[in-house]
Amino acid sequence: MATDDRLIIVIDPSPDRARNLKELIEFMDAPEVCTASPTDWRLHIGEHRLAAIFVSEAMPPQQMTALLDDVGKLDPNVPIVLVDGDCDA
């Protein structure tokens, strides 16, 4: 599978924090990177294969559990990076 169809997604309830982290990841010459909220992240994936997911720990525990369950159903092997929710990148 070509690397062009791989996507890194940053999921954070704060659009500003998500954008800051997205810019840092892009700076490292990563494949395509997008941001999403915890409720609409699936819409942003489209036909892409997930390379990794960066998730803010700022989410309420129930929302985090639901998100991680959904990611596991979509692709149980995708790397998930938990990011400190108090950090403003």
Image: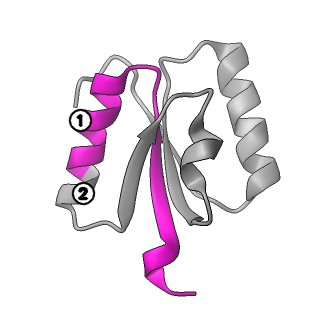
Q: Percent x, y for residue 59?
A: 55, 18
Residue assigned mark 1: 20
Question: Answer yes or no: do the residues labelled 1 and 2 have beta carbons within 8 Å?
Answer: no
Quadrant where the C terminus sits is top left
Residue 33 pos. (x, y %): 37, 55
Q: Residue at x 41, y 40 (%)?
A: 35
Residue furthest to the top in view is 60
C-alpha separation, residue under disc 1 versus residue under disc 2: 10 Å
**Which segment is the magenta one?**
1-24
Q: Quadrant of residue 50?
A: bottom right
- Can you tell which quarter of the image residue 12 is in? top left
| Residue displayed at 63% across by 59% down | 78
Describe residue 44's horizontal placement relative to residue 21 as left or right.
Answer: right
Q: Quadrant of the N terminus?
A: bottom right
Q: Which mark is residue 3?
A: none
Question: How far from the left and from the top, in percent, is residue 16?
Answer: 28, 24
Q: Is residue 85 above or below residue 4?
A: above
Task: Give percent across and percent down for residue 67.
Answer: 69, 33
Taking the magenta stretch, the answer to whether it contains residue 71 is no
Q: Which picture quadrant has residue 17?
A: top left
Question: Can you say whether 45 is above or below 61 in the image?
Answer: below
Question: Which residue lies under the disc numbered 2?
Answer: 26
Q: Residue at x 30, y 45 (%)?
A: 22
Mark 1: few/some/many CA within 10 Å (<14, 14-19, 20+) = some
At label 2, counting other C-alpha atoms closer than 10 Å, the crowd grade (few under 14, some 14-19, many 20 or more) is some
24 vs 71, left or right, is: left
Q: Amino acid at mark 1?
A: Asn
Q: Residue lying at the far left in this picture: please name it.
A: 27
Residue at the far bottom: name it: 1
